[in-house]
Image: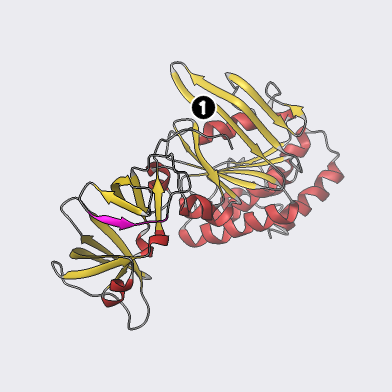
Amino acid sequence: MASLHIENVTKNFGSVKAIDNLSLTVEGPELIALLGPSGCGKTTLLRMIAGFIDATSGIIRIGERDVTKVPPNQRNTGMIFQSYALFPHMTVGENVGFGLEMRKIAKEERRKLVKEALSLVHLDGYEDRYPKQMSGGQRQRVAIARALVIRPDVFLLDEPLSNLDAVLRQSVGNEIRALQQRLGLTSVFVTHDQKEALMLADRLVVMKAGRIMQSGSGAEVYNRPNSRFVASFLGKSNFFTGHCNGGGHFNTTSHLQLHCPKPANGTADYTLLSVRPESIRLGPEASSFDNSFEGKVERVTYLGSLTEVELRLTAEDLITVQLQNRPGQTFSAETGANVVAGWSSDSTHLIADTETAVPA
C-alpha cells in the first residue's frame, strides 16, 4: 500500500478553474469517496491522480514519489472507468492481462496473474469469453480484475456502479469494498450518489466548484455538516434561518424559538439550524419533545419502507418528516389535518454556513 498526497493542486481549463488550490491526503489502506454535484471537479481530480490530466500547479505524490509530471503508465495506479472501457475484440483474459503485457511481464507469469485476478472477482474460467457475452455486472468485475492485476499503489474508481441496476449496484459495491479491505488498497472513489458513498467509504470528501467543502466519516459529515450545501447534498434536511443566542435557543426569522445544544464555538455566527427528517416524530408522542409545534399536513407520500410527510409550521417553515413504516404503524392523515411535530434539541445542528474550503 502507498499513501497519496495532493498539495495545493490547481487545474485551469482556459478561464475555468476546475480544481482550486486543493490539498488532500489519503493514507493506506483507506478508501475515500469524492462526492459532489456534476461539474464540481471530482472526476478531473481523479484523472489528475491517474496522470490523464496535467496539473496547472501543485504537487501529487504517491508514497514518497513525486508523480506530478510522470506519465500514466509509470504511476502504478489501477483505474476503473464508468463505461468499463474493455476492448471488445479481446477476450476477458486478454483484457485483464493487457496492463501486464505493457509492463513486459512474461506470458506464463501473465497467465498466472490473470487467473488469480479473475478468481478475486469470482470469474474463474471466464478467460476465453468476450465482453459482449457477459452481463453488465460481469463486465464490471472484469474491469476490476484488470485494475487489480497490476497490483496498484493507488486504486481509482470513476463512478463504477452508475451503469448497473439497483440490485447489482449493491452487490458489486459490496464486492469492491470487500476486495479493497482484504487487499489493503489505498483507494479513491468518485460518485455523485450519497448512498454509494456512505456504503463504501471510510471517509467522505464533499466537493463544490473545485474545492473541498468538508471531509470526515459518513456519520460525521451527515450528522454535523458545516454548511447548507453539505447538509443538502448529503441527504435531506430541514433548515430554519435565524440566530442562536448562545444559550441553547435559536430564534428563527419566522418567530419560532427552537431548543438546540449550546454552540461549541461561542464566537461563530450561527445563522442556520438543521434537523434531519428522520429525527422528527408526529402525533401524540411528539408533544413530549423540547421542540414541539402544531402544523398542517400539506402532503403525504408512501415510499415503501418510509412515509414522507410535508408539514406547514408557519408561512415560512415547511418541514419534511420521514417516518419508518412498520406493520400496523403506517402514518395516515388527510391533507389539511393539524398534527403535532416534535424533535429533541439533540437532533438539531447549528451551521455558521460560511462555505469555506478546507484541506483534507
Percent across and percent down for residue 31 are 63, 48
- Range drawn in magenta: 256-261
The residue under the point 53% across, 60% down is 170
235 left or right of 6 in image = left
Percent across and percent down for residue 8 are 60, 25
Question: For the residue labelled by badge 1, is the local secondary structure a helix, a strand or a loop?
Answer: strand
Percent across and percent down for residue 212 are 51, 35
Residue to which mark 1 is pinned: 19
334 left or right of 303 in image = left
Query: 92 or 264, which lies in front?
Result: 264
Query: 124 or 28, which lies in front?
Result: 28
As for residue 6 lying within the magenta part, the answer is no
The residue under the point 37% across, 58% down is 276
Asked whether residue 325 is in view, the answer is yes
When the figure is inspected, residue 194 is found, relative to residue 63, above or below; the finding is: below
Q: Quadrant of residue 176?
A: bottom right
The residue under the point 15% across, 52% down is 315
Please rate how many residues cluster around mark 1, counting C-alpha atoms within 10 Å: few if below 14, some from 14 to 19, many from 20. many
Asked whether residue 237 is in view, the answer is no
When the figure is inspected, residue 76 is found, relative to residue 30, above or below; the finding is: above
Q: Amino acid at mark 1?
A: Ile
